[in-house]
Image (tube, helix red, strand yellow):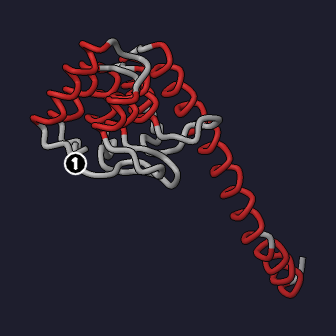
Amino acid sequence: MTRRGKIGYFITVMSYVPLLLFVGFVVWKAAGSVLESRADKLLVNGIERGNVAAVRQALANGADVEKVVSGTGIPPIQLASAWGRTDVIAALLDGGADIKRVPENCATPLIFAVSNGHLAAVKLLLSRGADAKGIQSPSGRTPQSAAATSTQMTDSQREEMAVLLQKAGATK
């Protein structure tokens, strides 16, 4: 091969480098998305089953603790709060969940726990920094109004919840 042929061959090969880098990047991103997806699925599964070990494993594998759970429209901490999974709530908070973050058209974790009558979850959320004051949902609900209208509690449980929220500074 002549010198001119070698240079031409080199230029031809080098013209494919950007394409190869791009394809490699796309494959790498796709593999990352699959792994994130698996971690996110493990996280949701752990929340649903109350499996703290699965939640911690999912977080260690890169699950997004703030990502809205597919099919629910709410983040993991709100989902765990709605089901009263105190150990899972603690694991999510330890994993970086923002107790005060409220996605668009969603209520706070505290509203979810109060509405479903989960006193232990409410106590945990308040102890970890949840704010019991003010409106905390797009529909204008406060923790006190959520407790007063919850159908998930008996009258005595509703009273106990109201007292707890008042001590935390909740307003009507």
Residue 86 sits above or below residue 76 on the image: above
Percent from the top left, x then y, of residue 89?
A: 32, 28
Pick out the residue farthest to the left. Answer: 167
**Residue found at x 47% / y 19%:** 46
Quadrant including the N terminus: bottom right
Residue under circle 1? 133
20 relative to 25 in the view: left or right: right
Residue 142 sits above or below residue 87 on the image: below
**Residue found at x 52% / y 51%:** 105
Q: Nearer the viewer, residue 93 or 81?
A: 81
Occupied quadrant, residue 56: top left
111 relative to 4 in the view: left or right: left
Q: Nearer the viewer, residue 4 or 160?
A: 160
Residue 13 sits above or below residue 34 on the image: below
Q: Nearer the viewer, residue 86 or 82?
A: 82
Percent from the top left, x then y, of residue 115?
A: 39, 28
**Residue found at x 19% / y 19%:** 160
**Residue found at x 33% / y 51%:** 135
What number of labels is visible?
Answer: 1
Residue 157 sits above or below residue 24 on the image: above
Callout 1: 10 Å neighbours few (<14), some, many (20+)?
some
Identified by mark 1, the residue type is: Lys
41 relative to 88 in the view: left or right: right
Percent from the top left, x then y, of residue 34?
A: 64, 38
Percent from the top left, x then y, of residue 6?
A: 83, 79
Quadrant including the C terminus: top left
Occupied quadrant, residue 161: top left
Q: Secondary structure at mark 1?
A: loop
Pick out the residue farthest to the bottom. Answer: 4
